[in-house]
Image: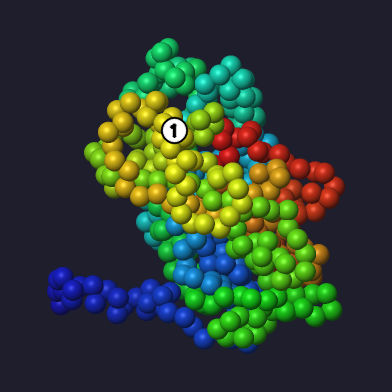
Amino acid sequence: MQKYSGFGLLKHALSHHENWQRVWRNPKPKKHYDVIIVGGGGHGLATAYYLAKVHKVTNVAVIEKGYLGGGNTARNTTIVRSNYLWDEAAFLYEHAMKLWEGLAQDLNYNLMFSQRGVLNLGHTLQDMRDIERRVNANRLNGIDSVALDTAGVQKIVPIMDCTSRARYPILGASWQPRAGVARHDAVAWGFARAADALGVDLIQQCEVDDILMQNGNAVGVNTKQYGEIHADRIGCVVAGNSGVVAKMAGFELPVESHPLQALVSEPIRPILDTVVMSNQVHGYISQSDKGDLVIGAGIDGYNGYGQRGSYPTIEHTLQAIVEMFPIFSRVRMNRQWGGIVDTTPDACPIISDTPIGNLFFNCGWGTGGFKATPGSGHVFAETLAKGEANALAKPFSMFRFHNGALVDEHGAAGVAH
């Protein structure tokens, strides 16, 4: 057997994995596809993968105006959990959680999924009432969840200030042991490689600038780079740009786009082995495998598409983090950014058909998009394959804003992240 080392080993490995190389080149688009997916982020790539694997629909194109996984998939704080209050949201996110638990094996790709648990802190009596309510609802739905008192929180996170003199007194928390974090880039790469291996065309650097219409139905898209590309069905998974694409088809979506702030610190030695979230102060923190403290803040109070940091929002969050974790007061911030989140009035997604035939949208996830990635792709793939909503997706029709059947998860899920 011939032995390889260094660059020779890498060259040998790549030469035997042509599918890996295909992911990063642009195939020439066909004139017609069974399904076009507009948006090559985590949700779009997951949709393509499950279309090909579960429903055997392989004549699929994922069209991305930038590069794969370059949007919110690369700009989030990687939290995965399913402890939502309302049945509709809880079932959807728990479906995603169960997929997460076997996803690395399914994709044969290390997603660095770490089920280290998530704490949602309570600082007031009302917080604790809400926590008890949510924990009880979770347990009735078969979702792991426990209500902790102050001593229980301190036992899990000894470095947090749980004393009575704290500025934000910690009266307790909800605790989901199965929750955790994953590597966001790896999720996009894993789905992209797996979809590509099943025959899906991944077309990067290709911007859609119009929806082609015929007799009230969508029949394809027009792109700046390749002109018209036709399809039987079109699924739009473009997050904060959903409203822009909807207007191309002549209707409006009940979504607004806001920059969502986050930052990471310089790497430090391992000291925090779980995720801590606070709704009251709108801050959450975990530590990555590289040692960075990953800190999430809130959305800016204005609409926008700026993928950049907003210092006032981050300053408020850092003040709270330092109050709760005095040990971090001298840690330096490494970088900050803004992701673009699309929010609906009830803080729940839209997974739906539209007034235009053959055109479907998956959007409005707000700050809950990353944790839903495999579940979102799984249910949306079925919706596109069959032309009607999956059972888990039915409560999230865009038409619920006409008939008043809102899910209203906003603020009910221990901070909507």
Q: Position of residue 254 (x, y in %)?
A: 73, 53
Q: Nearer the viewer, residue 143 or 22?
A: 22
Using the image, determine if residue 263 lies above or below residue 377.
Answer: above
Question: Does 388 sit left or right of 142 as displayed?
Answer: right
Q: Position of residue 218 (x, y in %)?
A: 75, 75
Render colour scheme = rainbow
Q: Position of residue 226 (x, y in %)?
A: 57, 85
Using the image, determine if residue 377 lies above or below residue 295.
Answer: below
| Label 1: few (<14), some (14–19) or many (≥20) C-alpha neighbours in 10 Å | many
Label 1 is placed on what type of residue? Val
Which residue occupies the extreme front position in the image? 312
Using the image, determine if residue 187 lies above or below residue 116.
Answer: below
Which residue occupies 65% across, 29% down? Answer: 137
Question: Does 178 sit left or right of 160 as displayed?
Answer: right
Q: Which residue is mark 1?
A: 276
Question: Does 197 sit left or right of 127 as displayed?
Answer: left
Which residue occupies 68% across, 61% down? Answer: 243
Quarter of the N terminus within the rendering: bottom left
Is residue 307 among what the camera can see? yes
Total labels drawn:
1
Quadrant of the rendered structure where residue 376 is? bottom right
Query: Element type at marker 1?
Result: strand
Quarter of the C terminus within the rendering: top right
Using the image, determine if residue 252 lies above or below residue 226.
Answer: above
